[in-house]
């Protein structure tokens, strides 16, 4: 009798369980330690390890962590018992902050937002609202330039020159395009009948810390005036003292029609703003735009304190002086190590192109106790708190050089 027995069946593959999901959605690769405290230019993890902060929450905590003045401004607002009222009502901190900007800038009026992207999205709407008032029916286009980053929302993403950020989310907002950072090209595309606004960062942060040429910005200001198109400057990363003047545009001798700010405005509390000139302010009517939280009394009270500190001439001089010194030290590292392709920047906003992937250097620096962030795959970006001392910068530079060489 021949056996009809079948060979034993292979064991059924055990289904591999999907990796556990992080409670916070995985849109960021977060570093492992749990940060529990801040102290000036240091962040401290749960084991007590101190990290020198060359990131400042990505250009946000310009006055450092646990600043007594910022803490007092928070306490002061809390003691009034009014954290939020909505924009249906007037509050003293909101009015004082707006008046401060009117007194210290080109602006006639201010709209409060909650983030950089929201400020830019609002500026795009304001540009279209203004364009409607010109009675040119096709005037609506928003134009951004190569290397730009203006945010992650449908309008601002359409104006952001990062294919990896944009492609999964198409279609983005229509009527938004990106052109070369070149005056001849802009002269060719800027049609007064269709273009509403051009938006530019005076220093492109996420795009690799690229200082936009002053000649380009002067030419762009003249061209946008000639073609009856608004100029929006995005100073969300480079503004509020970071480049050594309170607004970056002050160093250029031009004034925009709108300016957007956010990041350091309340040293870490979420607030953004759109500063607008007379021309734009006059067309905006009740109901044209809105936001629930924007410029609430707690946020505005802190921001009012912060803008006075960040516009202090002594602080701005400090930024210019230590910034120039820092740039020269970065050059020294480039000369000594041969690991660097280029250095760019101004004030306390610098980028360093490295041959190695920036992430590898950032990881080694992290182990040594230095926090850094990249701006593209091969660019290290330096955005320390503006109150950092030269000695603290020197300590960070030593960790940086050691991390570059191994
Ligand atoms: C120049 C610029 N614009 C806009 C944004 C968007 O700001 P937020 O992340 O607050 O939306 C950023 C953020 O990095 C920025 O650097």
Image: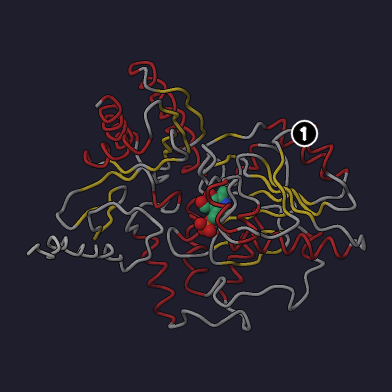
Task: Relative to 398, say whether 34 is above or below.
Answer: below
Q: Quadrant of residue 204?
A: top right
Depth order, front residue of 181/224: 181
Residue 158 pos. (x, y %): 65, 54
Depth order, front residue of 276/192: 192
Q: Residue at x 50, y 80 (%)?
A: 84
Q: From the viewer's perspective, is 49 left or right of 128?
A: left
Depth order, front residue of 120/137: 137
Residue 122 pos. (x, y %): 67, 64
Q: Is mark 1 within 8 Å of ligand 1?
A: no
Q: Residue at x 72, y 30 (%)?
A: 215
Q: From the viewer's perspective, is 136 left or right of 119?
A: right
* Position of the C terminus by quadrant: top left
Task: Relative to 340, say whether 171 is above or below.
Answer: below
Residue 366 pos. (x, y %): 26, 42
* Position of the N terminus by quadrant: bottom left
Count of labels shown?
A: 1
Which residue sits furthest front?
Answer: 1
Task: Relative to 394, say whether 84 is above or below.
Answer: below
Q: Secondary structure at mark 1?
A: helix
Write down the residue under mark 1.
183
């Amino acid at each position: 009798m021949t056996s009809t027995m079948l060979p034993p069946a292979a064991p059924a593959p055990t289904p591999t369980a999907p990796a556990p999901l992080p409670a916070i959605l995985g849109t960021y690769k977060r570093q492992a330690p749990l940060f529990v405290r801040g102290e000036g230019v240091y962040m401290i993890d749960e084991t007590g390890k101190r990290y020198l902060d060359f990131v400042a929450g990505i250009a946000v905590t310009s006055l450092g962590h646990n600043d007594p003045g910022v803490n007092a401004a928070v306490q002061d607002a809390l003691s009034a018992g009014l954290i939020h009222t909505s924009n249906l009502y007037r509050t003293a901190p909101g009015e004082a902050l707006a008046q401060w900007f009117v007194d210290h800038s080109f602006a006639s009026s201010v709209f409060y937002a909650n983030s950089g992207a929201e400020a830019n999205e609002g500026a795009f709407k304001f540009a279209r609202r203004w364009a409607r008032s010109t009675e040119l029916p096709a005037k609506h286009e928003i134009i951004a330039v190569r290397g730009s980053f203006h945010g992650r929302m449908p309008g601002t993403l359409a104006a952001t020159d990062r294919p990896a950020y944009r492609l999964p989310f198409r279609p983005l907002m229509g009527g938004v395009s990106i052109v070369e950072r070149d005056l001849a090209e802009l002269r060719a595309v800027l049609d007064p009948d269709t273009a509403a606004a051009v938006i530019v960062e005076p220093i492109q942060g996420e795009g690799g810390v690229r200082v936009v040429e002053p000649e380009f910005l002067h030419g762009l200001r003249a061209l946008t005036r000639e073609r009856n198109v608004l100029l929006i400057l995005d100073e969300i990363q480079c503004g509020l003292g970071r480049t050594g003047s309170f607004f970056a545009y002050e160093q250029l001798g031009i004034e925009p029609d709108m300016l957007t700010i956010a990041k350091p405005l309340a040293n870490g509390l979420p607030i953004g703003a759109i500063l607008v000139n007379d021309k734009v302010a006059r067309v905006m009517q009740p109901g044209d735009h809105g936001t629930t939280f924007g410029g609430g009394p707690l946020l505005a009270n802190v921001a009012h304190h912060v803008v006075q500190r960040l516009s202090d001439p002594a602080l701005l001089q400090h930024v210019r002086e230590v910034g120039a010194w820092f740039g020269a030290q970065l050059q020294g590292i480039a000369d000594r190590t041969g690991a660097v392709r280029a250095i760019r920047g101004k004030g306390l906003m610098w980028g360093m192109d490295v041959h190695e992937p920036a992430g590898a250097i950032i990881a080694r620096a992290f182990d040594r106790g230095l926090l850094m962030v990249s701006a593209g795959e091969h660019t290290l970006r330096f955005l320390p708190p503006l109150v950092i001392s030269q000695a603290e910068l020197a300590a960070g530079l030593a960790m940086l050089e050691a991390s570059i060489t191994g």
